[in-house]
Image (cartoon, rainbow, N blue to C red):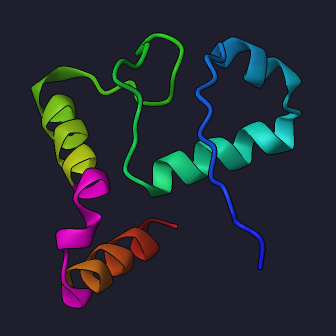
Amino acid sequence: MGKSFTYETEVDVDLDDILSELDDKDKQELVDELYDEGYVPSQIDSESDSYNYNGIIGEKLYDALTKLRNNRSQLSNEDEEMIINLAEKLV
């Protein structure tokens, strides 16, 4: 039998180079996958984004929704069901 070899290579790639080669569908899949893994933007431009919450209550709501999104794995099935039921009342 022949010997097998393992080689490791490190490549320095600029993220902009990768993104410029992706079409819109691929970019959306990347964003969705990152979001599913718990990654969210570190900074959101509140003037141009739908994450525009006004006032103290708005900030508390935004913080609460962010905690829910970032810590979903800590929610029980009952917690998730309650949130889903609440959201369904709004539609």
Q: Is residue 12 left or right of residue 38?
A: right
Q: Residue at x 10, y 26 (%)?
A: 56
How many numbered circles are shown?
A: 0
What predominant SS class does the magenta segment belong to? helix
- Give residue 4's position: percent from left, percent from top: 69, 64
Q: Is residue 7 left or right of residue 91?
A: right
| Rendered view: 39 above or below 12 | below
- Give residue 73's position: percent from left, percent from top: 26, 70
Of 17 and 52, which appears nearest the observer?
17
- Give residue 59's position: percent from left, percent from top: 18, 29
Q: Is residue 42 left or right of residue 23?
A: left
| Rendered view: 71 above or below 46 | below
From which residue to which does the magenta span run? 68-78
Pick out the residue farthest to the bottom: 78
Q: Quadrant of residue 43?
A: top left
Q: Indicate yes or no whether the magenta region holds residue 70.
A: yes
Pick out the residue farthest to the front: 1
Q: Quadrant of residue 21?
A: top right
Q: Indicate yes or no whether the magenta region holds residue 88.
A: no
Q: Is residue 3 left or right of residue 22?
A: left
- Give residue 48's position: percent from left, percent from top: 53, 14
Q: Residue at x 75, y 23 (%)?
A: 19
| Rendered view: 59 above or below 88 | above
Q: Residue at x 44, y 65 (%)?
A: 90
Q: Residue at x 63, y 44 (%)?
A: 7
Of 39 and 63, which appears nearest the observer?
39
Quarter of the image that includes the N terminus: bottom right
